[in-house]
Image (spheres, helix red, strand yellow):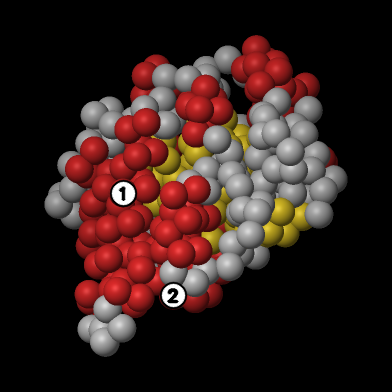
Amino acid sequence: MNKLQNSKTIFENALKGKYAVGAFNFVNMEMLKSILHAAEEEKSPVIIQCSTGAIKYAGIKTLVAMVKAEIENLSIPVMLNLDHGKTFEDCKNAVDSGFSNVMIDASHLPMHENIALTKKVVEYAHARNVTVEAELGQLAGVEEEVSCDTHAYTNPMQAKGFVDATNVDSLAIAIGTSHGTNKFKGEARLRFDILEEIEKLLPNYPLVLHGASSVPQDIVATAVKYGAKLEGVNGVPENILAKACAKNICKINVDSDLKLSYTAGLRQHFAEHPEEVDIRNYNKTAMGKVKETIKNKLKKVFNSSNMA
């Protein structure tokens, strides 16, 4: 029987293999099945994650039970992560409920408070064989319950001191990505100079990119064709993400792309089948779009296919 894994071996293998593991958000059974089936077919390790907003929507016991049932017969490594826990209680609840990794996001706090809260979460989680991700620097944009008006790049020296002080297992850094579907004004670019400086100070250490959806324009075009209003949406170009995956970026978060894909599938199905009332049929169409999006990323962007 397959069991959830924490980040230790998953990220060690990613660093050695020069690939990244996709971290995909889910809120329901359909999205969960789409993610896991795509990863299993590609023989790729995968991270499934849910936010505090998803937990409020579906209930933490329901989410964990679905995950454990769905991974039982899979052959791939799977990690269940809490995305953007804001408090110690958020993280403790996830650890106690069966998550194998938690993210404590105290990046909005002064440095000494971020260190103190992260260290507290690390001590609690490590005692229960759960790994921890933290964040340094801030990403602009809005996604679920995460909102920030300004962007602050991660300071490499602070990143080194933060990891040493907290013993955190992975670190989300800010090098130019942002939350939501409107990521760039003008040319898209990431600060690879900052990434490379962090890598020098923290060699062979797992780094994470949040706000890294690509917002594929073919998916956007399908959604718009069938009635969606998505003016000016843009994401991180896949060639830029692929370059980051070849470095120490071990985990890349994807949420907006899945929402767009699911929405495009639903809109297309309803437009082509206006008589449809069977929930299973239109959900299958939407799930197919999500699987297609995920498999493309695993193969062509994250380079994690056949790494399980």
* Lateral position of residue 294 relative to residue 238, left or right: left
Closer to the eye: label 1 or 2: 1
Q: To which quarter of the image does residue 10 belong?
A: top left
Sequence-first tag of 1 and 2: 2
Disc 1 vs disc 2: Cβ atoms closer than 8 Å? no
Can residue 285 be spotted in the picture?
yes
Task: Classify 285 as above or below 235.
Answer: below
* Location of mark 2 (residue): 58
**Residue 259, horizontal then vertical, whole percent:** 47, 61
Q: What element carries label 1?
A: helix
Residue at image coords 44%, 54%: 219
**Could you tell me which residue is drawn at 53 percent across and 61 percent down?**
51
Residue located farthest toward the top when viewing the structure as drawn: 200
Picture residue at 58% right of the left edge, 39% below the top? 236
Q: Which amino acid does label 1 sit on?
A: Glu
Residue 195, image quadrant: top right
Instruction: Tell me if I can see residue 124 in this picture.
Output: no
- The type of residue carrying mark 2 is Ala
* Along the viewing direction, whichever of 67 and 131 lies nearer the viewer: 67
Q: Which residue is drawn at 18% across and 54% down?
A: 72
Quadrant where the image shows the C terminus: top left
**Residue carrying label 1:** 292
CA gap, disc 1 and disc 2: 25 Å
Local packing at callout 2 (Cα closer than 10 Å; few below 14, some 14-19, many 20+) is few
Q: Which numbered circle lies on residue 19?
A: none
Secondary element type, mark 2 = helix
Q: Where is residue 275 in the image (x, y as percent from the top left)?
A: 26, 87
Q: Give the x, y percent position of residue 38.
A: 27, 47
Q: How many badges with numbers are in the image?
A: 2
